[in-house]
Image (spheres, coloured by chain):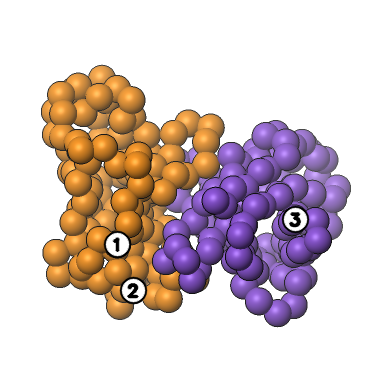
Amino acid sequence: AQSVTQLGSHVSVSEGALVLLRCNYSSSVPPYLFWYVQYPNQGLQLLLKYTTGATLVKGINGFEAEFKKSETSFHLTKPSAHMSDAAEYFCAVSEYYNQGGKLIFGQGTELSVKP
Amino acid sequence: DTGVSQDPRHKITKRGQNVTFRCDPISEHNRLYWYRQTLGQGPEFLTYFQNEAQLEKSRLLSDRFSAERPKGSFSTLEIQRTEQGDSAMYLCASSSRGIEAFFGQGTRLTVV
């Protein structure tokens, strides 16, 4: 069975500092991996995805993530945090061929950005 | 922007009442998913459709829940005899190939 673990339910950084949100997954087949962002009382917006190919993927708003198969990780980073990055971030895994594209989400990490 | 649309955005209902939510996916997306999100948690999969066929239902989807997608376009999620534990955000998503899912704004249900 697939699962996702996000390490740290709350992360606080200063504006301009590095953002690192951790995600580890479990999957029996090569996974598709995603990061979504959610603002209060809103739906989820896709930041980036890994399916196949290059293991370092770039997304919107300056975020990127690296797929590391040996570590079963897909950590999200951004070199310099902005106040507007404050939100809830969710890592998700999908076993496309077996599961029809349904997503299994982690518990989420709330990112706070201090001025 | 013709993204995924959900209606209503908010619903307050008394325990025991029935409620129905609607989701309009992105045009021509053949896959449609329903998720439930409780406070402080990640979304949990409920069910998904490929065109009008409901292909998978989660164990979370009790007998009080039913979802339809009659013509392979919009979908409805009905909850009968609502309970306080049904209070959550209900999210709909659609995709064209089952890879990248686009989410709606969600319907927040409060059962009092």
Residue A38 image position (x, y, % from top left): 54, 48
- Kindly report which numbered mark, 2 or 1, lies closer to the viewer in this rendering: 1
Whole-angstrom CA distance, mark 1 to mark 3, is 30 Å
Q: CA distance from mark 3 to mark 2?
A: 30 Å
- Could you tell me residue A111's position as x and y percent? 69, 41
- Subunit of mark 1? B
Q: Are marks 3 and 2 on the same chain?
A: no
Task: Answer whether labels 3 and 2 touch (C-beta < 8 Å).
Answer: no
Tag in front: 3 or 2: 3
Q: Residue at x 40, y 69 (%)?
A: B95
* Residue A111 higher or lower than B104, as above or below: above
* Amino acid type, residue under disc 2 in the picture: His
Query: Disc 2 marks which residue?
Result: B29
Using the rendered image, report if marks 1 and 3 lie on a common chain: no
Q: Give the number of the mark in front: 1 or 3.
A: 1
**Position above or below: A33 against B81:** below
Tell me what hue chain B is rendered in.
orange
Dot 1 lies on which element? strand
Horizontal placement of A29 versus A66: left or right? Answer: left
Specify the chain shown as purple.
A
Mark 3 belongs to which amino acid? Ser
